[in-house]
Amino acid sequence: MKIGITSEQLNRTLTGRGNYIKNIIDYVSKNNTFDLKLINYKNTLLFPEVESEIIKNQMSKFSKKSYLYWYAGLSINMNLISKKFDLIHAINSEPIYLKPECKLIVTIYDLLPYVYPNSYGFLTSFRFKKILPKTVKVVDQIITISEHAKNEIVTNLGVSEEKIKVIPLAADENYIPLRESKINAVNSKYNINYPFIFYVGGLAPNKNVDTLIKSFYKLKKLGIPNKLLLAGEKRLKYKSTFELIEKLNLQNEVIFTGYVPDEDLPGLYNAADLFVYPSLYEGFGIPPLEAMACGTPVITSNTSSLPEVVGDAGITVNPYDVDELANKMHEVLTNEDLRNNMSKKGIERAKLFSWKKCAEEHLKVYEEVYNMK
């Protein structure tokens, strides 16, 4: 079977979505049943041994968001491209509006632009609001990453449940409890010599970081010595978050690490006393799963897909309730037996998810779609 998988996301800094794409491509490329090509506007450095189908992006020299223009080129050229394949997997929600010559699968992670329309520019909004509804009409199968995301797709795009396959994501295998020497090495690299509460992610409105900071402020009033360590890109466009930190006089208590490479994250998860992820909306939510795999107690939201991820191994709270979040953080940090119990349950919960299982489910979908009449 000749398969094409879009790989444009691998041209950028890898986050949760990029890691998912990388893992699926890695698994498919090693399976001799499939003749795989990557569909991109340039060769990706991650898989130099895998042949690519290059669709030139003339805007790449002029725009930092050249991938948005590449999406348009992919849609326009889909009929011509698709003649070279038996099946194409548009793995990054690419907006395809023309029925291809081959079978087509699209992964849709979430519908954030529907929920937070003011957080996205014109091109992204147009892609989701105008093109994606056309995409779901020409695809043979949709893959998504949680039951919550599936329900969102059914509700907002009018897709039948039978057309959607839910395949959960996973944490990479290096997210495990580590020896003290490895933890100390990462702490030293980031100049950490204090106990801390950990958060990984961006500062976008759906991440709800301001609520975390307000809850942390209340926690400090109770005499907790921990600092709050925020890992992720520090973007100036979210200046209200920095203003809040100054207003609460937490400049020395809230620490921004900036982007943390994958090789350092397990050490930071292990070093943390508690991982808190009060996001309002997630298609899946890999960071809580990574934290649990490392044995770190997790508090997260009781909204969207997050309860599906943590099960009964983490504590879920109303993400709008500052006092509840502060109280739960205090409870975990002051109760060693509770922390140890959450650590054990988290490690066991994380074992239910794996990239091998995720990839194998994808291969099953490929076979099923290819054999559709």
Image (spheres, grey):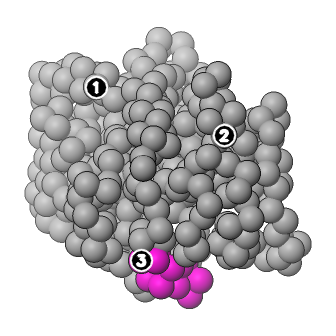
Mark 2 and mark 1 in contact (Cβ < 8 Å)?
A: no
Nearest to the eye among marks 3 and 2: give it: 2
Magenta segment: 119-134
Towards the viewer: 232 or 112: 112
Q: In this view, does 268 lie to the left or right of 341?
A: right
Q: From the image, which quarter does the N terminus lie in?
A: top right
Residue 348: x and y, percent? 24, 20
| Residue type at the position of mark 1 | Leu
| Residue type at the position of mark 2 | Lys
**Quick check: 36 above or below 266?**
below
Q: Is residue 336 left or right of residue 106?
A: left
Q: Which mark is residue 133?
A: 3
Nearest to the eye among marks 3 and 1: give it: 3
| Residue type at the position of mark 3 | Pro
User: What is the chief secondary structure element of the magenta stretch?
Assistant: helix
Closer to the chain start, of discs 3 and 1, is: 3
Give the labeled residue for mark 1: 352
Per the image, label 2 sits on a secondary structure element best described as strand
Give the labeled residue for mark 2: 2
Closer to the chain start, of discs 1 and 2, is: 2
CA gap, disc 3 and disc 2: 27 Å
| Image quarter of residue 236 | bottom right
Q: Residue at x 53, y 13 (%)?
A: 181
CA gap, disc 1 and disc 2: 31 Å
Closer to the chain start, of discs 3 and 2, is: 2
